[in-house]
Amino acid sequence: MSHKHLKEAFISNLNGTSLLEISLGLSLAPLCLLCRGLLLIVYYLHYGKPLSSRKHSLLLDFLLLVSPLVLSCTVLSPIIFFVPIIIAAFCAGIFSKIYSQRKCESRVPFRQIVQEFQKTYLDAEYIPAITVFRVYVNLLTSISILAVDFPQYPRRYAKTETYGTGVMDLGVGAFIFGNALVCPEVRQKSYVTQPKFSNLAKQFFSVWPLIFLGVGRLLSVKSIEYHEHTSEYGVHWNFFFTLAFVRLAASLLLAIFPKNRSWIIAINLAVFYQLVLNTTSLKTFILHGSDGRDTRVGFLNANREGLLSLLGYLAIYMASVQVGLYLLKRRSSVRGWMAAARFLVLVVLLLFLLLHMSQAHGDAVSRRMANLSYCLWVLAHSLTFFTWFVVTDLTLVFTKLLVKGSSVPSCWDVVKPPGTGTRHEAEAVPTGRDGKLTHICLISAINKNQLLFFLLANVMTGTVNILIDTIHSETAFTLCILHLYMFVNCLIMYILHAKNIVLKFW
């Protein structure tokens, strides 16, 4: 067997892991974010000023926000059920330390602090959980696309062959979910009137980088005979094409139908597609080709997974637009966001119930077909992941109230009630002599150039695979490579952000 075929076999015929393991794993990133925030507050409590060193900020962010994710999907995967518990216990210890060491003037009854917290007003124009969600989906995807080629990455986390729930299967759908949350139709103010098809015209121009990247990936993979998983999207198709065509199709639908009814379109698409799968030979065609022997002759046969799964991904996108519209409703208080978090939890429970029914009476989850069960699973876990970040942000806001003047990047700012000014109390934000921020958050840095970050990850993944025999790598070597790969990618984003450079040509 050639080295190319060996690598293809290494990532093929896999069945995924349990919903419980994925659900528990989703708590890792929010807990890491909470840990970083609490440590920054402790630093302010001890030194009376925020962490201002850019080098130390980068190292802290990388060690707390990125490195634990690399370790959790490699050497710590056998004890993954205990990792969140350990991090949560550590966070609880830090919080206890902060609470016990508050300044004397802040010593008020705990119940009074909770009441003050519930009445606190937040910056209604900024929802950090959306940014953090999108950045972490990008980070986790970037880690996984290289780590999957090493033996230390559990095969149960990789993309499944036909049915099953792998971590990387969720990543694909979560990318669609994150894109829809910030699409132009969601961000457009309700009082702004634009021609119906204006967003569609803009999308035609805005998706050209994705088409370009898709063509570039296709040509590079074929020219160097890079290993590929054909049953993932097909012979010529790839995820860049899926992103582009889903965005275009969604913009067309949103130009025709009211955007606040996008959930109805999503249900109709997903249910109709599932009915077609169940009542026609479409499912057999996707899994086995037109001749029943997995033929790849002809464009449709060659790319049947990528082309036909567009319906499922479009349903996810349309449902996510509805989520985005709900999230961007103006909420200016902690109480409002606590109510929103409770509502999201109820929606998650409903989605998991529907998922159970869909799998019991229909098909199991299949990313390859993007069937109804897959759509429900992606939405349930994406909302779970997002809700974790909302709870994390609220916890950090509560802790900042204990330590007046402390600040945490990529977290809600406390503001005064409407009509009384802007800031509730000036949060300490380190600035340099020229007035520019000296503290740069890694999350903000990646968010500035998300597409570039993902592109760099893909290029570096290909480079590593060409230069290194990943399948036979030792554990220590694997960890070094993965950490170096992620650090270089993060460092480039950090430098670009420090120089206020955004590489966007459309």
Image (tube, grey):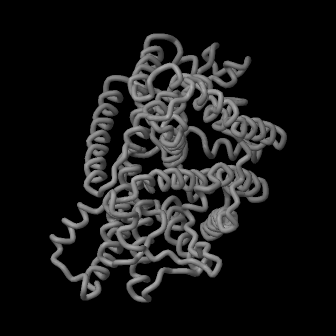
Which residue sits furthest top?
280
User: To which quarter of the image does residue 395 belong?
Assistant: bottom left
Q: What percent of the width, then of the height, locates residue 195?
A: 57, 25
In x, y percent, where is residue 29?
45, 60
- Foreground of the two, 241 or 110: 110
Q: Measured along the vertical axis of the image, is residue 290 above or below residue 303?
A: above
Count the numbered circles shown: 0
Q: Position of residue 424 (x, y in %)?
A: 35, 68
Say whether residue 309 is visible.
no
Instruction: Identify the residue at horizontal 36%, vertical 23% (top origin).
Output: 362
Q: Name above or below for residue 316 compared with residue 175.
A: above
Which residue shows up at 17% across the image and 71% down it? 112
Residue 224 visible in the shown view: yes
**Position of residue 249 in the picture relative to residue 380 (left or right):** right
Vertical position of residue 258 compared to residue 211: above or below: above
Residue found at x 47% / y 64% = 76
Give the camera-side residue of 149 and 334: 334
Question: Is residue 31 found left or right of 4 in the rendered image?
Answer: left
The image quarter containing residue 489 is: bottom right
- Residue 297's image quarter? top right
Is 52 placed above or below 410 here? below
- Horizontal side of residue 490 vs 167, given as left or right: right
Residue at (54% x, 31% y) in the render: 368
Q: Position of residue 208 (x, y in %)?
A: 72, 35
Quarter of the image that includes the C terminus? top right
